[in-house]
Image: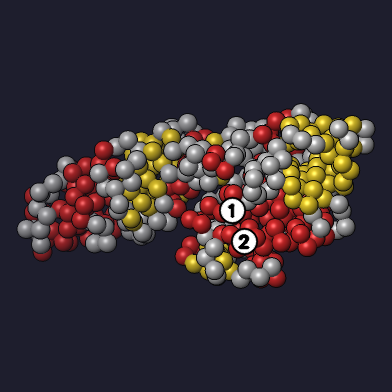
Amino acid sequence: MSALEVDVVVIGGGAAGLFAAATAANRGRTVVLLEKNERPGLKILISGGGRCNVTTTRSGKDLELQYGERRGRFLRHSLHGLPPTSVVAHFERLGVPLREEDLEKLFPVSQKARDVLEALLADCRRSGAQVVTSAAVLSVARDGDRFVVATNDRVWRAHSVIVATGGLSYRKTGATGDGYGFVRSFGHSITSTYPALAPLQVDAAWVRQLQGIVLHGVEIASMDRDGRIKTRRTRPVLFTHKGLSGPAPMDLAGDIEESHGGMVRLDFAPNASIAELESQWLESAKHHGKRLAASLLPAELPDRLRTALCALAGCEGITLANLDRAARQRLLSVVKDLRVPCERSLGFDHAEVTRGGVALDEVDPKSMQSRLQPGLFLCGEVLDIDGPIGGFNFQAAFATGRVAGLHA
């Protein structure tokens, strides 16, 4: 089988790979993108409920810190080169205007993820990048001054290879982590991988009995097995028949998985201290002694939840006049520091991203080139990078894909 010669082979037709391919081709490089599925961009199509949260309105140091100190520092150069404002401008040029929604999210005005994918594919076509589908890469090897990339039906030879294969999340899109094997063959380390941005499985019966309740303005935090708080979020929380979902709990999934279980800590009155709440409650008891203890809880909490919290504190049916100090302290603890065991998320089948991947110290953040193998570039979710819900992971994919495309 004779090999086809190109300058750059991009492996993976997701957000990072498509952006990298168009960027490299716009530099005059001959580029082929190899996608193993029949269609590229499957994860783009299903993201954001089929609407695709393209990026965020966050910027500068604030944006960088959303990925955590270590990962944010690695992304600094990429995010500076392609900040969210540039992503917005880029999609405007491609004919896909974006609009801001809750939680600083930016979606296409059309509300169609397909428009985002079609714009990225059209950008590849205009630039001259060739997109080949149903092309599963079997191996990547070095032969002299070229890479040899073998697929199921042909062989490509290239000066540079960009690995943009993603991680293990959303397995129904074909994610198998095959890119990890390609880069391992060049000596790269893969850090432990975990599901991230996934609903949490919580076995506590009272949680599951509150299925359907959505909370706003409460604080939820992940805690490791030693009781250390890892991440705090004040974003919507959804109670489900399996546990907790919504932006805030899903943001904590990577921490819970990485800690091999722990706790989620709920604060239902984050804007008041325990001392302030107790003072308010004592004052209320002076004037409304016949009211039930549930009346002390934040008014915005649904009745079903207020009843459940009182039951957890052993204060069901107790009036304020009969609420002794011990019962009041139990109720304060439930409102301000309710700790719920949580051993796992719902796993990679439900995870939006993968935590872990190619070790960042083995990649040059200014070029996305491997420090171990010249000519090998890595971008997107195959790297040990993940951010919270809100367009941060697409933002990182586009930004790192651009850098790889500029240097491959």
Residue at left offset 57%, top offset 43%: 173
Q: Is residue 333 left or right of residue 167?
A: left
> How busy is the neighbourhood of tag 1: few (under 14 within 10 Å), some, or many (20 plus)?
many
Q: Is residue 295 left or right of residue 242?
A: left
The kind of residue on which mark 1 rests is Ile
Residue at left offset 80%, top offset 36%: 154
Report which residue position mark 2 lands on. 116
The N terminus lies in which quarter of the figure? Answer: top right
Q: x%, y% of residue 389?
A: 51, 53
Q: Nearer the viewer, residue 104 or 159?
A: 159
Q: Nearer the viewer, residue 95 or 61?
A: 95
Residue 44 has which mark?
1
Q: x%, y% of residue 175?
A: 60, 39
Q: x%, y% of residue 378?
A: 74, 43
**94 up-or-down from 265: above or below:** below
Q: Is residue 10 left or right of residue 264?
A: right
Q: Nearer the viewer, residue 304 or 382?
A: 382
Asked if the residue under mark 1 is in contact with the one under mark 2, i.e. CB atoms within 8 Å, the reply is yes
Label 2, label 1: how many angstroms apart (C-alpha)?
8 Å
